[in-house]
Amino acid sequence: MNAPFFKFGYFGEETSLIVAFIIGIGFGFFLERAGFGSGRKLAAQFYFTDLTVFKVMFTAIVTAMVGLFWLSVFGIVDLSLVYVSPTYLVPQIVGGLILGVGFVIGGYCPGTSCVAASTGKYDGMMYLVGIIAGIVVFGEAFPLLKDFYSSTPMGKVTIPELVGVSYGLIVFLVILMAIGGFAGAEWVEKKFAAKAKGALQ
Amino acid sequence: MSTSSEAVEIEELEEQIVAKVEHKAQPFWNPYLAGIGLGLVLLTAFVVMGRGLGASGAFSSLVSVGMHAVAPEHTSANGFFAEYLGDGTHNPLKDWLVFEVLGVVVGGFFSGILAHRVKGSIEKGPRISSGKRLLLAFLGGGIMGFGAKLARGCTSGQALTGGAVLGVGSWAFMLAVFAGGYAAAYFVRRQWT
């Protein structure tokens, strides 16, 4: 078996769109199951009262990362054919900061706002309109932003390549970090729940 | 004595009936279970397509097509929009991410219906009016849209997908998102708490 299937020509462009739709259904389904159609639940991440965003995101990252790693070890997936988006360090950090601010003000990110809108949240629908406006503004400002947008290019580089260690070692360290993070998240939630209780009494 | 306990019983029964008829919203899944589900969807995308998930890219395609319909010359001359429009031989909406995001809308709705969570409502804390909340949702969406384009992706394409393939920029981006969120949280606390 040679994977990724699409890269080995098992099916064409037209079929890939059907695959996209089906994968999207799965994506939307689990986002909604996690509670990510609720802006309050998402925003609670930033007030330490509900760290579901962190838990779901890192569980998903670890699941996909470990799966991909073992499939490549067994020679099923050719890791070099899996897309890694190129790094432009400074604009990505600045973009991330801006995006984080937008997250807590708006209550969603683009994917979760789709789920919020489709489950009837009016603020999710407004948020979608906002995204469109934001992209129009970015596009119109692009001639001015172009130089910064393309600055600090590092190519399609991964952490193991950058540090110069094996892929497996970084996978292992991310797992350890996630487990530590989950324990920390449970502790923080308990602490803040106790504090909220104390404030009520 | 007996009448008051009977009244309580009747009240409880009524509540049960109302809950059954209205189909009370079910609780969300355990976050780790939902995370594994999400991770398996992402892994499937890697194995089948050789690429991960995304969201904001679909909106870029949509915006580019919309802008092109209104002002074709102006939009084609813009380097950012032009890239999403392509060379004209291909419909820019016949795009992988556009179809994936359509799926997200359907999948979210499907899950919401099954759990009785589809309901017209506004997500907000008790201390803010609906009008203000909708305004902030629009504003937040705008900031997010701008930031996502600058970072070449959002929480789906960069943090989740790029995180799982250990991309350097994606991890830097992910830490920045949390930093930005926590830094701004204090200023909008009246919206949520």
Image (tube, helix red, strand yellow):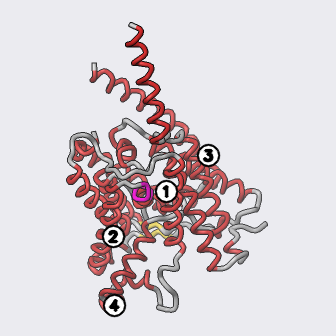
Instruction: Tell me the distance, in whole angstroms, between the alpha carbons under discs 4 and 2.
Output: 18 Å
User: Is the same chain shared between marks 4 and 2?
Assistant: no
Which amino acid is tagged 3?
Phe
Amino acid type shown at disc 2: Ile
Q: Which residues are magenta?
A: A115-119
Residue drawn at (35%, 72%), measured in percent from left and top? A149
> In which quadrant will I find the N terminus of chain B?
top left
| Same chain? Circles 1 and 2 | no
- Name the chain under label 1: B
Q: Which mark, residue B153? A: none
- The residue pinned by badge 4 equals B72
Q: Residue under label 3, please give it.
A: A172
Q: Disc number at residue A132?
A: 2
**Callouts 3 and 1 on one subunit:** no
Report the mark closest to the observer, 4 or 1. 1
- Label 4: element kind: helix
Q: Type of residue at label 4? A: Pro
Q: CA distance from mark 3 to mark 2?
A: 39 Å
The residue that label 1 is drawn on is B109
Q: Is residue B25 visible?
A: no
Q: Chain of mark 3?
A: A
In front: label 4 or label 3: 4
* Among numbered discs 4 and 1, the one appearing first in the sequence: 4
Between marks 3 and 1 in the image, the one whose residue lies nearer the viewer: 1
Foreground tag (1 vs 2): 1
